[in-house]
Amino acid sequence: MDDMDPAGRSYEIRSFNPDPARCEGDVGLTRPTLISPRLPADDGDAERIRVDHEAALARQVAFVVDGMEGHYRFFGYSDGSVGLDLSKHWGAGPRGDDGRNHATVCSSTIWTAAKSLRGWPTAPARWENLTLEGELEAEDLAYADAPVDLGTERAIDGLYHYGAEERRAAAELLYANIYDGVGGNFVHWASDAQDNYANQIVNCFASDHCNQEDRNNDHWRHTEDANAVSPDDLLLWDAPWGHNEPLALRPAQYRQAYTWQRKEGEGDLLVKVVDPDANPVVGADVYVAGRYGRTDELGKVRFLGVPAGSEEVSAMTWTGEAPSVHLLTGSTTVSVAPSGLTSATIVLGERQPGPNEINEPQEMIVNYAISATDDEWIAGNEHGETSDTFVVRLAHGADSLRHVIHELEPFCVGDEVVVKVDFVFDLLTDNQVETIARVKLYEGTSCDTNDLEDHEEQEQTLGLDESGHLVFDLENSGFGGGDTAHVDIALLNQLTP
């Protein structure tokens, strides 16, 4: 979830710590809690379907949290329902208010997400008006913070009652900590800064009054009962999960750890590429022992694990603008030490095109076809297809003409399965074109999903007037998977007509 404050600064809220922790004063470790659907009562189909549905609901709540826009509102600790209060939504800033910029904190973020399912197009109708707590069970009534009874005037499902005295005691503790944290030097004492800071922040928690004038009063001491939800409270919900237990941790033990050791007979090679005036060349292509690298801003590139012995190292770069371009090349022979670091310097000089090279603009013609299937185990499968052709112009000269990146528009099927395809084209010195195609399969709750399920990369180098063919078959093989994608790509390298 991304949070943004009124000044436009963005913050990322990460998941709870999955590791055990020990806070100051704890006797033992605080272990993470595992939540899951209610355990099946038997092995029947009805219980299996019920568990699958509850697990899907829990995942849906997580997806909503992940896509939620919001801002951190201290008042959410006093009124957990503030996340659905449109008057509390903050709409200023670059993203604006799209109806989902909630005021949330801590566990109320999950409560807000669960109560917002009706606003998400991928949520089934049965999840609208979702009841989180429902009828109070014995463990609910025995809990220190009683759930808000659905039969009362202030009934708010999924929130828990916090009495005025309990809240006042917490406010006093918060006030004292802030007061002491400000410090007690003479300047603070004379300006009453400690009291002002503490009052303003605690008023913000208690009543959503966070302005400058709220530092001069202690209205927070007159707080009333409130309804909120803590991490412990939400474990009592009947939905979307009904079971929780401390995460089972394996006892600590010693095990042998393995690490990679350099292969015998290999060393590292540091290559520096300079022009005839000894200036470093940035972005030069360097080749050694079948390996490729590109120099950094210092004109250097490092190769790890190069076979020891004599190796020829070559480098090249283009200078000028098309059509007036020049190829600079250079090479040297270096003896790579069997261990440690060996250094080499290559001085580039101008090179004329060879007899088999043509210094004319050329193009790569790409025909592609994409098909994808959204596998639905309850409803029928959804299938979609698309195809098109595009042309990439290439020429010896500027990097923008020799190195081209092209991305296709994401292809979405069933509002949840997305196929993304991108290409990288590099024009080589002998008019060959190296093509790298990458295909990624995503599955989530909308066409904007970033939940990657499968991916594949292929490359092919074609000479002038040569054609090629790439085929990709991807599948979501995880839980609830079955979604597939097929991509067929035809390539042709030719001179521009």
Image (tube, rainbow, N blue to C red):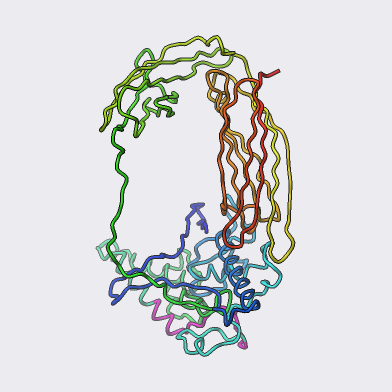
Residue closer to the observer: 62 or 430: 430
Residue closer to the observer: 402 or 230: 402
Looking at the rendered image, the quarter that the C terminus falls into is top right
Q: Is residue 406 above or below residue 356?
A: below
The image position of residue 198, as x and y in percent, is 38, 69
Q: Is residue 361 above or below residue 303?
A: above
Res 193 visible: yes
Left or right placement of residue 249 versus residue 432 in this view = left
Splitting the image into 4 quarters, where does residue 294 fall? Answer: top left
Q: Which residues are magenta?
A: 151-171
Splitting the image into 4 quarters, where does residue 23 fall? Answer: bottom left
Left or right placement of residue 317 versus residue 456 in this view = left
The image position of residue 461, as x and y in percent, is 57, 27
Splitting the image into 4 quarters, where does residue 287 fall? Answer: top left
The image position of residue 280, as x and y in percent, is 37, 21
> In percent of the image, x 28 and y 71: which residue is there?
24
> In percent of the image, x 48 and y 52: which residue is there?
9
The image position of residue 175, as x and y in percent, is 36, 73
